[in-house]
Amino acid sequence: MEKQVILNEKQFELTLNRLCYQLIENHNDFSETVLIGLQPRGIHVLKRLKERLEQILGHSVTCGNLDITFYRDDFRRRERPIIPSATNIDFIIENKDVVIIDDVLYTGRTIRSGIDALMAYGRPRNVELVAFIDRRFKRQLPIQADYVGKTIDTLASERVSVEWNEIEGLDKVVLYTPENNG
């Protein structure tokens, strides 16, 4: 696979900061808003956004993690079983504005699963979506992000990876293309 860096470390940081200010513009002090990261990789975006938002606002922001494993439509269709993660929502979402956060929006199926799983915790007033990367083409469900870090037009054969300093050693977004895609 050939790889191309779509966002380098500096662009990655600027993108996170821009998303924070867009969220603040629409949610002010977050007193009526909660942030929920989708397991497994959306929680990394959530962690970074939470740190920056709290630094900018000067107070804590209510956040949680949501495991969507059993809400996925491909749960039983995989060769290797999906291992559930821990959901951590220890607050009320009823009548709150909920911002779902994920790293890559592609087909829309993960987000649909996230919304289904979220409804088991109550009825939010409003649900919005932050996608750090939006792969515009190949949407299978009519889902779009309210906040987008970067939009990338890709082929179905390509893969986009949001890589984190804590896991892969450097913050960056990489596009992987099969070498025969010429």
Image (cartoon, rainbow, N blue to C red):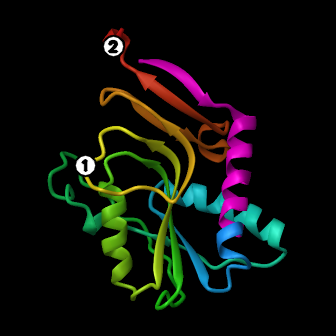
Q: Which residue in the protein does label 1 denote?
A: 140
Residue that appears at 76% across and 61% down: 52
Is-magenta flag for residue 64? Answer: no
Amino acid found under the numbered disc labelled 2? Asn
Which residue reaches farthest left?
Answer: 77
Is residue 15 shown above or below 175? below
User: On the image, numbered disc 2 is attached to which residue?
Assistant: 181
**Can residue 68 be seen from the camera position used here?**
no
Towards the viewer: 37 or 99: 99
State which quadrant residue 35 falls in: bottom right
Which residue is rendered at x = 62% and y = 43% of the image?
Answer: 164
Residue at disc 2, secondary structure? helix
Query: What secondary structure do most residues of the magenta stretch adopt?
Result: helix
State yes or no: residue 20 in magenta: yes
Q: Is residue 182 left or right of residue 66?
A: left
The residue stretch that appears in magenta: 1-24
